[in-house]
Image: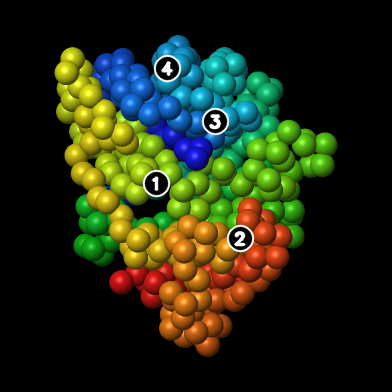
Amino acid sequence: MSHALYFHIPFCVHRCAYCDFNTYAGQDALIPAYVDALVREIELVGQSRPLTAKTIFFGGGTPSLLTVAQFEKIFTTIRANFSLAPNAEISLEANPGTLTRDYVQGLHDVGFNRISMGVQSTHPDELRMLERIHTYSDVVDAALAARKAGFENLSFDLIYALPEQTLARWQATVKLILGLKPEHLSLYALTLEHGTPFGRWAQQGLLPIPNPDLAADMYEWASDFLEENGFQQYEISNWAKKIPKNLTGLKDLSGFDAYECQHNLQYWRNLPYLGFGAGAHGYATGTRYSNVLRIQTYIDRLSKTSAKANFPLSPAAVSKHLVEREEAMQEHMMMGLRLTHEGVDAQIFKKRFGADLIDVFRNEIDELMKFGLLEWVENETSEVSKTSEALRLTKKARLLGNQVFSRFVG
Ligand code: SF4
C-alpha cells in the first residue's frame, strides 16, 4: 500500500502569537544538523521496509527556511530509500515572506509541484495583529514567481473570525485572493489556543473573542462564494478547483477531477503515513506514533551510531499506540466524515473492517439522521464499486462537525 511522507521543519523567523505548532524561532543555527538528522531518519525507516510514497509534504514551522541545496539532499535520500509513485504530489508549506524568485525556481527544479502559502489575510492591520512577517504584496510576488517557475498547483491558507474582523473585511480578503487564481484554498477559523499569547490575552479580556455567529456567517458566505467561483468543497476547511480537461496527467494522480490535497486526503481516508522530524506524527501497520518535540534532542537521537529503526518507528519516536479494531473504526468515521463530498464509503468500510457501517454505528447514524446532520449519497469516487453508498455530513452539519464526530468516539 502506498504511504504518504510528512516532514516537519520546526523553524520560524518569528513565533506568531496565535500559533501552537511545534516550532521555534531563533534556532536557525541548528538547521544544517537538523537536515542531517532528517536524512538519517529517512535512511533508517526507508531501509527497514521498502515502500512506495504517493505524496511528500514538508510542513512546519516554516519549511521555506531550508535552502534548495538542503532540500536536494533530502530528496536524494528519499529517492534512494523509497519508491516514488509516478505523479507523486510533492508539497511545500511556505511563508510568502520567504519566497524570492530564484528560490521558488530552485524549489520547482528540485522536484516540488505544489506550494501551500500561509497568507491568512490581505489586510496589513490584520497581518500585523497576527504577527505575520509578510505583506499582501509579498504574496502577490511569491504567486507570480511560482507561476513563472512552472507551479500549476498553488494553495493559500486564510484565517477568518479574527478579533474585530467584519464580514465585509473577510469578503474583501477572499475576493482579492481569488484574483491570484489559486487551485486550492484552506479556510480556518481563528482558534484561541491555550498556552499561546492569544489564548492568554483572550482570557485576561485583552483580546476581543471572535463572535461565533459572525464566524458562521463568514464560513457560509465563503462556502457559497467559492462554489459560485468554480471551487468544490471537499473537506470542512478545504476547497479545490476543478482540473481543466487538458491536464489529464494530473487527473490520473488521484482519480478525481479537482486539485484536492492528496497528502491530506491520505489522513482523512485513514490511510498510512510516515512522519519524519521533531514532533512529527505517523500512522502505519496499525500503530500511531510521534517523535520527540525538541530539535536538539531529535538531532541527538538520530546521531547515535547505534541508532536503528523498528518500522515504522525511528530512534526519534517517543510514543506509540497500537490502534485496536474498534478504535480504528471510530477514527475512520471521525476522519472520513470531514470529507464533505466523499464522506465515508460503505464498501470501503466493509472491506477494511469486515463489518457493515450501518450495523456497527446504527444508533449513532439513526440519531444524527433524525437531526438532519448526516445523509446517504451515491459515491461516484468509490474505489471499490461504482454503486457504493457513502455517509456524509449534510450542508448544515458542516459547522457542527465536532459534535457529530464526538458521537462516533467511545
Ligand atoms: S509562521 Fe506559521 S508555524 Fe511559524 S509561528 Fe507563525 S503560524 Fe506558527
Indicate if the residue with disc 1 has its beta carbon within 8 Å of ligand 1: yes
Q: Amino acid at mark 2?
A: Glu
Badge 4 or badge 3: first in the primary sequence: 4
Name which of mark 4 and mark 1 comes first in the sequence: 4
Q: Residue at x 55, y 17 (%)?
A: 110
Q: Which residue is mark 3?
A: 90
Vertical comparison of 75 with 343: above or below: above
Q: Secondary structure at mark 1?
A: loop
Residue at the front extreme, as displayed: 354
Q: Name the N-terminal-most of marks 4 and 2.
A: 4
Q: Which residue is mark 4?
A: 77
Residue 365 percent across, percent down from the top left: 49, 79
Mark 3–mark 2 CB contact (< 8 Å): no
Q: Residues within 10 Å of mark 4 (few under 14, many from 20)?
A: some
Res 125 seen here = no
Circle nearer the viewer, 1 or 2 = 2
Secondary structure under tag 4 reads helix
Looking at the rendered structure, the secondary structure element under dot 2 is loop
- Mark 1 vs mark 3, foreground winner is 3
Q: In this figure, which residue is indicated by the disc labeled 1?
A: 130
Residue 107 % position (x, y) = 54, 20
Above or below — where is 131 with respect to 100? below
Residue 336: x %, y % from top left: 50, 60
Q: Is mark 4 within 8 Å of ligand 1?
A: no
Give the Cα distance between marks 4 and 2: 35 Å
Q: How far apart, in angstroms, are the residues tagged by discs 1 and 3?
A: 28 Å
Kind of residue sitting beneath label 3? Ile
Which residue is more in the foreground, 100 or 32? 32
